[in-house]
Amino acid sequence: MTQNNSKNPINDNEISGLSIYTFVTNAHYKKRKDLLLIVFDDLVNYAGLYTKSSCPSIPVQWCKKNLSQNTIKAILVNSGNANAFTGVKGHNDLIKILAPLSSRLGCQLNEIAVASTGVIGEFLNTDPIIEALSDEKVKKLSNWDDAAYAIMTTDTYPKLSFTKSSIDGHEIKIVGIAKGSGMIEPNMGTMLAFIFTDANVTKQILSILLRDITNNSFNSITVDGETSTSDTVILFSTNKANHKIVSDIETSSINYFRDDLEGLAIKLAQQIVRDGEGATKLIEIHVTGVNTKNAAMRISKSIANSPLVKTALYGEDPNWGRVISAIGKSYEKIDLEKLELFFGDHQITKNGSIIENYDESLVKKYMKNERLIITINLGSGRHEHKVWTCDLSHKYIDINTDYRS
Amino acid sequence: MTQNNSKNPINDNEISGLSIYTFVTNAHYKKRKDLLLIVFDDLVNYAGLYTKSSCPSIPVQWCKKNLSQNTIKAILVNSGNANAFTGVKGHNDLIKILAPLSSRLGCQLNEIAVASTGVIGEFLNTDPIIEALSDEKVKKLSNWDDAAYAIMTTDTYPKLSFTKSSIDGHEIKIVGIAKGSGMIEPNMGTMLAFIFTDANVTKQILSILLRDITNNSFNSITVDGETSTSDTVILFSTNKANHKIVSDIETSSINYFRDDLEGLAIKLAQQIVRDGEGATKLIEIHVTGVNTKNAAMRISKSIANSPLVKTALYGEDPNWGRVISAIGKSYEKIDLEKLELFFGDHQITKNGSIIENYDESLVKKYMKNERLIITINLGSGRHEHKVWTCDLSHKYIDINTDYRS
């Protein structure tokens, strides 16, 4: 396989030390890019987080079990088929694909990370994938736009984000791609998200950073409360940047980098929610004044996952009582008298019931916005959490009554 | 208030020792029965279970706090307004209604059980309710059909069940009414359900029986995974039957009674699910071969609450991979190789993937039924659990985008 360092078509978000390839395999979808291969010039550091599902897909099993080494040569991602609940044959199919690829790349099998999304329970159509990865086909370098496109399933647009950061005065680049639209409530990791940087940091630093940023980004979004078999987020560093290698998490030199990384992850996460199946609105649920961070997370998720809240928001109906009910089903201890609820800047409750002179017409008007912020202050502590979700519309039903066709 | 023992219109399910009254108050709905009062001849034993919501309604707070006595004179239920998150005013409104009623009935305030469902956060329209309960209006006895009707909100039909049982050779009657359609995943107690019997049993026996039967009935249904502010189930016994009073839970004399009570509760629970908002199918999820009862409950609920499973069932699409995914998001330990999945009698998986010679056309045909049974055998233990749910259709969205109008 040709290894070259020629520029990607979009220069500004080029990450040194990797090459992008995308393919139309026709394995599951017809005539669209559905396979992504990213090859690193050298073996690179990585950190991965995966679904907590007790029925994880074969690719998730593979990554968790086999990527025990510190370094990775390539990542291969297909869309259309999750290779989940496919048993021994599913595992063998994966090896069948990876064996020729690893020999071409001159690496070990377990130096290739993999991820798949799509239908669960169906066997991979391996031959077109193997064919696509043959020497003949892998010649033309691709770009990040195509990469983001190649990993889509029911997504209506590709998710891509790029940012520049710095470590010790040296410019650092970060690029992330993601996919996800339904079956979204990541719980450790997410749908699929891959973040690439040229930062020169150790594997241990990557692991800590990834865990930190995931809680406030990919683990803080929900479309339908579903955790998939395939959730995967992997952060790779090619270590090509010129600064001195960072191996101490306490150093202040990575503060900007950490913030920029989190900002990029939040952007990708929001892109996923905005593309939630059938979504017409992006909704931020901000829960403050809570005794513990965990309680704040549980309460915000309880609201964000409530189909009754989500349908009311779709209908632009300020039925705030449903938010109260959703707070209640978190089973966290709540002092009703202290609970303050806001839709946008409009305060709705005080002292345990609706405020005097509440003007519903103003809130009704606010609800016509495409981005809505619901804030709850429980008045009981100093912790807070923010999650993003979307509304629940007819189109969610349309898409999911017959997803496979 | 007139207390008489004249027959209810439907004699067969008459329970000795109580009188039923229903009213059209026009308080929240217009021109339909929306208020139910049941008055007991004597003070009766009762047992109640209530929502676990941390934002419980005023009526739930009232019952939990005030019904500490052993006996009850009456129960009052209104529909259309939940009197939830209404604070001090909500509490005062309730007292305003109960004060004249208790004086008419010659009982204490805390000898009246109350329950309300409907919109959360709006104040009760008390005057029409007080007016309805005035001496003038309470003259005409009503029947169980009207009682079941008077407690409905978005329900499309009244839920009523009647059965005969026996204790020590004496005939026992049991009547239950319930309401519930959306915001249904009871967690301790349920939507609203009230069960009346003439069995001569102690309050302690009632409490134990209610807890037993609720787990396999009202706590084993789900429409949308929502726990409401108002969930309440109360079991009353008028003690009018002629057998010797039962005060020992270990006695075999109440075995039939317990079974019949559970059967009736399951019937009511199934009626609620069949009337799930927008439901077109009643679905039974049966999880067997599990190490613990709790794990079996969590796995079955995880499937029953999955919007992706429910939309696939609505679309009659045998997308069984979504069931696997929903099992996975229970986070219980699963041996994928042992997992056997059935739609009706059709086995789908074996040894960790789809069975050989799987014929999807047969399963497609099966899915056209109005009642579907999905069975999962995890092959790992002797425990099992069954839950009932419905599919998720366009109509759920229709109903809930504008529930208040």
Image: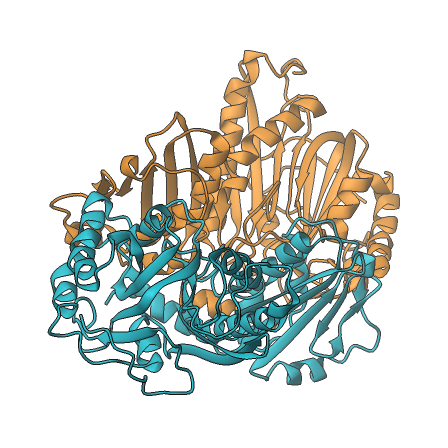
Chain colours: A orange, B cyan
Which residue sits at x=29%, y=52%?
A: B110
Q: Measured along the vertical axis of the image, is residue A316 above or below residue A270?
A: below
- For the residue pair B265 and B357, the one nearer the viewer reads as B265
Residue B156: which quarter of the image? bottom left
Please state, as top left, top right, bottom left or bottom right, where the C terminus of chain B lies in the image: bottom left
Q: Is residue A181 visible?
A: yes
In which quadrant will I find the N terminus of chain B? Answer: bottom left
Query: For this rendering, which residue is in front, B63 or B178?
Result: B63
Q: Which of the pair B72/A299 is nearer the observer?
A: B72
Residue A365 in view, yes or no: no
Q: How far across and down, in percent of the image, does residue A155 sit?
A: 53, 57
* Occupied quadrant, residue A219: top right
Q: Which of A151 and B364 is in front in this view?
A: B364
Q: Where is residue A367? Give x, y as percent.
A: 26, 53
Left or right: residue B180 versus residue A248 is left
Q: x, y percentage for residue A236?
A: 67, 33
Give the image location of residue B159, x and y in percent: 41, 76
Please tell me how many numbered marks the rendered image carries.
0
Q: Is residue A88 above or below residue B136?
A: above
Is residue A302 toward the left or the right of residue A364 in the image? right
